[in-house]
Amino acid sequence: MAARLRGVREVLRKANRVNNLFMPQFETLKQAKIGQSAFNVVTDYAMVFKDFVKGIRDRPFRAAVKLSALGAVYFVYHENPDEQSYIDGLIENSNDLLQLSDLIRNPKSDHYIQELISYQNQGRLSRKNFGLFSLITVDEYGKDCDLYNTKCYYLQPRWHQLWKQVVDVGVLRHWYFLEKAMKNYDINEEELANCPPD
């Protein structure tokens, strides 16, 4: 019992030294509730860290699986594309289409990209961030529109109607529908339909 008391006193002395370094306005930890709280938090985190290390030693495979899953989730979160990357991709795809002749350009790709460009020019495209993925939606009104319908809470679209406004899904720095629309953008299938068979 005496050894335990000596240990507690030694810990309090060390905590007082830390307290005097960081919070000199308090003379002792007993006078400082903030100091006591900070000391409790530090000891709690130290115990959690010790338990964490003990858990890794006891079950290394389980810990590896959990850490791998956590790392994968963080990677997907970190690689979530932003709105600027969508706009840059949209402009780049528009430029790629403009460099082609009307005879070669795929009309479906051209129509899709031109429609999105017009939405962007009207300020109607917006990004909804869901952490691991993003959605690009087309709003009914532009960002600069100041009508009553844009401000009234009861006239705003509800979450269950969000899927009707979605034009693209972004995951891992890729925009799915934007990339899909540009697949074979330089092949005009209508033009090829008039070619004689081999």
Image (spheres, rainbow, N blue to C red):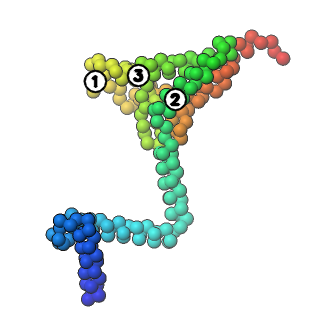
Q: Nearer the viewer, mark 3 or mark 2?
A: 2
The vertical placement of 44 against 107, above or below, is below
Q: 10 Å neighbourhood of mark 2: few (<14), some, or many (≥20)?
A: few
The label on residue 151 is: 1
Q: Is residue 125 above or below residue 56?
A: above
Q: Residue furthest left?
A: 31
Question: Of marks 1 and 2, which one's residue comes earlier in the chain?
Answer: 2
Give the alpha-carbon distance from disc 1 to disc 3, as whole Å. 16 Å
Whichever of callouts 3 and 2 sits on the residue coming sooner in the sequence is: 2
Q: What residue type is labelled 2?
A: Asp
Q: Is residue 132 above or below residue 36?
A: above
Q: Which residue is drawn at 37% across and 20% down?
A: 141
> Residue 127's x, y, as percent?
43, 31
The amino acid type, in three-letter code, at marker 1 is: Lys
| Label 3, label 2: how far apart the Cα atoms are | 15 Å
Q: Can residue 108 be seen in this view?
A: no
Q: In which quarter of the image is the N terminus?
A: bottom left
Q: Name the residue under label 3.
A: 123
In the image, taking residue 198 as reference, residue 152 lies left or right, namely: left
Q: In this view, does 174 lie to the left or right of 99?
A: left
Q: What residue type is labelled 3?
A: Gly
- Give the residue number, with chain letter if any, for mark 2: 88
On-image quarter of the C terminus: top right
Answer few, some or many: residues within 10 Å of disc 1's Cα (few below 14, many 20 plus, some between 14 and 19).
Answer: few
Q: Evaluate if marks 1 and 2 touch, with contact meaning CB atoms under 8 Å apart.
A: no
Residue occupying image coordinates x 29% and y 65%: 41
**Residue at 45% of width from left, 22% of height from top?**
120
139 is higher (above) or lower (below) than 103: below
Residue 119 image position (x, y, % from top left): 45, 20
Q: Is mark 1 on a helix, strand or loop?
A: helix
Q: Which mark is residue 120?
A: none
